[in-house]
Amino acid sequence: MAQVDLEVNGRAYRMLCEDGQEERLRELAAYVDGRLRQLTGGGRSGAEAQMMLMTCLVLADELQDVMAGRGIAPAVDEAAVAGQLDTVAKRIEEVAARLERA
């Protein structure tokens, strides 16, 4: 069993995990810390347990959406997607032209 030191909301935690899973646990803690800061405006307050609970509930809600197939839509850069589609269309036209010549 490995030990890993984590920090969430400015508080240090020492956790046990399987050997080799230390970095993954750090990534997860950083994600939870980031979501907590996002949801609470980044400030610490005396209601730390409530802030942690709220973060857990939001994460559980997001997980339920993903498990139900509703997923969380990523932000889409429509101009970039259009540019990529244009590039693919040009390549298809080039291949079609070569096939016609053959």
Image (spheres, rainbow, N blue to C red):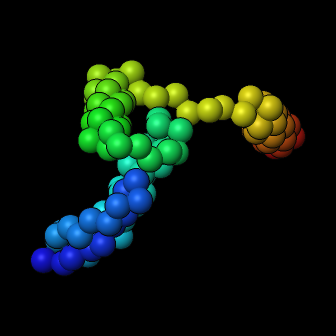
Residue 47 lies in quadrant: top left
Which quadrant: the C terminus? Answer: top right
Q: Which of the two residues, 21 or 57, is positioned nearer the viewer here?
A: 57
Residue name at image x 62 percent, y 32 percent: 75
Above or below residue 69? Residue 91 is below
Residue name at image x 12 percent, y 77 percent: 1
The residue at the far front in this view is 46
* Residue 54, image x, y percentages: 33, 33
Q: Which of the two residues, 70 or 48, is positioned nearer the viewer here?
A: 48
Above or below residue 102? Residue 28 is below
Drawn side of residue 79 relative to residue 17, left or right: right
The residue at the far left in this view is 1
Residue name at image x 52 percent, y 28 percent: 73
* Residue 83, image x, y percentages: 81, 36
Q: Is residue 1 visible?
A: yes
Above or below residue 8? Residue 42 is above
Residue 60 lies in quadrant: top left
Residue 57 lies in quadrant: top left
Q: Is residue 52 visible?
A: no
* Residue 44, image x, y percentages: 44, 47
* Residue 3, image x, y percentages: 21, 76
